[in-house]
Amino acid sequence: MDKKTSAGRCWLVGAGPGDLGLVTLRAKECIEQAEVLVYDYLCNPEMLKWAPDGAEKIYAGKKAGEHTLSQEEINALLVERGKAGKRVVRLKGGDPFVFGRGGEEAQALAAAGVPFDIVPGVTSAIAGPAYAGIPITHRGSNSHVTFFTGHEDPTKTESSIDFAALAKLGGTQVMLMGVERIGAISQQMLANGMRADLPVALIRWATTGRQETLTGTLQNIAQRVADAGFEAPAVAVFGDVVSLRNELNWFERRPLSGKRIVVTRTRSQAGVLTAQLAALGADVLELPTIRIEPPTDVRGFAELVQDAHAYDWIVFTSPNGVNAFFELFYKLYNDAREIGGAKIAAIGPATAQRVKDFRLHVDLQPEEFVAEAVVREFKKQGGVENLRILLARAEKARDVLPKELSAMGGIVDEGFAYRTVPETRDDNGARRRLLEEGADLITFTSSSTVENFMALDLPWPAGMQVASIGPVTSKTARDLGLTVDVEARRHDVPGLVGAIRKFYE
Ligand code: SAH
């Protein structure tokens, strides 16, 4: 994307079928440079995070029956922002030109003279069957594929789908939209001479952790959909290739397929935990419980940071503290040496790592955030008598550490680097899904994840079980009235994932 052009432009971008790994590099590049992002219901919300801070994000809706913006309004919006000189990215589920009305949007842009690019995407019409283990073409089975829409303009009285032609054509037929009309559609197909025993598969939320597939025949599929309460969005495949799924089903056979698991996104470990659970097939709801905000008194903290070189020790108690400190430090100074001769203490491995990321040596690193351990380590280094110590920490953190260091004779300045507040937003839709769909299991990787989750005061979904990383976390959970169903033997992320896997075996 050319950043220099002042003229606006619109990119009609395929967002892929759901799995973030199926988004194209080009799509990612577009999002990373967007000034305006207009996105749909079927776009994986995780990709919105690629947008620059301050990009305008507009939800265009389009979940059947709840149009947030009409098509005309969307067209007008793209034209208006484009004419205003913006880099507009219109993200559409799957491929923009496969039943996505991308053509109409491009026409509107063309008519208004707003230049545009088309970025194709992986369509659900192909990815859905693939993730269900159904090759849409197969040597010896079929020599053509038809894509059709089951969605009809409600104002039409006559069906726009030529079922007689479809029946005659044979091959593999892939239908987008219209699961809710599967009864009428399968009847039409039968009435036009298609085989009653023709294999049919419906794949909903394809390529995501919540993918489910329902199979049957043209004769019984409608009844099965009704019995299972099977709902949109789904891709339907009609054809003999469907039976290959018996051999080729891969995605839904992973150890945690069908399990919805909550990961509370409080610690930097959350990403790793999410990735490992998702790789085993779980539908992971990453739920942020807290948000990091600047401290109430930024100026006060900035003054301490400015004097950093005057301290003998700078003590960090969390990666967030390190981030907050250096963000200010490099606003004040453009030379790392301005930190002077201060030694650095970092509590916990993640904190130490963050310090190292800034290319600074960690002089002292107690493994745990237990006052005695920290004190012991400082004593090993010769104590802190009359030494000046800057403690960069969260507002309202437990205050044992400054007391202990003062008791050892240190001259301690407490710097409130940031504060944590309960997360009330729902950027990725995880909270809404948790409330609407519930979950099988919630994971806790520390006492604070339990406390922060409980502080949100959300209704506990029926039947949701609890997995804890170890006895300390389990105790906090029990103290807050929870029952712990899974406890890791090894108290790290792989240990927790292993325990969960075993639990479901
Ligand atoms: N342009 C999109 C299709 C938009 S029409 C594409 O290329 O995939 C919307 C329909 O797409 C839905 O009703 C459903 O039939 C299908 N669809 C999109 N994403 C899907 C998914 N992850 N799983 C199943 N069906 C999906």
Image (tube, rainbow, N blue to C red):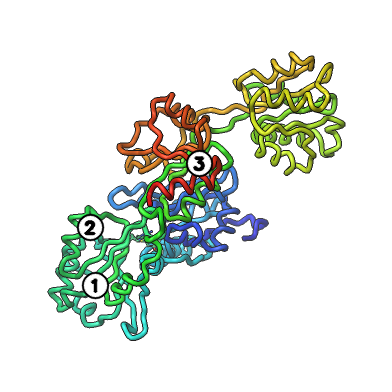
Residue ID at (36%, 65%): 132
Image point (33%, 49%), residue name: 67
User: What's the distance in space between the residues labelled 3 and 2, CA to CA?
Assistant: 46 Å
**Label 2 is placed on what type of residue?**
Glu
> Which one is earlier in the sequence, the residue at label 3 or at label 2?
2
Residue identifier under label 1: 199
Q: Quadrant of residue 373?
A: top right
**Within 8 Å: ligand 1 and the Cβ of disc 3?**
no
Q: Name the residue furthest front.
A: 489
**Amino acid of disc 1:** Pro
Neighbourhood count class around disc 3 (C-alpha, 10 Å): few under 14, some 14–19, many 20 upward = some
Closest to the observer, 148 or 457? 457
Considering only order in the chain, which callout, 1 or 2, is on the residue closer to the N terminus? Answer: 2
Q: Is residue 51 left or right of residue 388?
A: left
Q: Quadrant of residue 180?
A: bottom left
Picture coordinates of residue 131, whole percent (x, y): 39, 65
Residue at 70% over, 18% down: 402
Nearer the observer: mark 2 or 1; the answer is 1
Determine the secondary structure under disc 2. Answer: helix
Q: Residue at x 54, y 60 (%)?
A: 27
Amino acid type, label 3: Arg
**Splitting the image into 4 quarters, where does residue 294 fall?**
top right
Quadrant of the image where one finds ligand 1:
bottom left
**Disc 1 and disc 3: Cα gap in Å?**
46 Å
Q: Tag 3's secondary structure? A: loop
Within 10 Å of the Cα at label 2, are there few (<14), some (14-19), or many (20+) other Cα atoms?
Answer: some
The dot on residue 489 is 3
Query: Height in image: 448 above or below 158?
Result: above
Query: Is the residue marked by circle 1 packed among few (<14), some (14-19), or many (20+) residues within 10 Å?
Result: many
In the figure, 208 relative to 468: above or below?
below
Left or right of residue 228, residue 92 in this image: right
Q: Which residue is mark 2?
A: 180
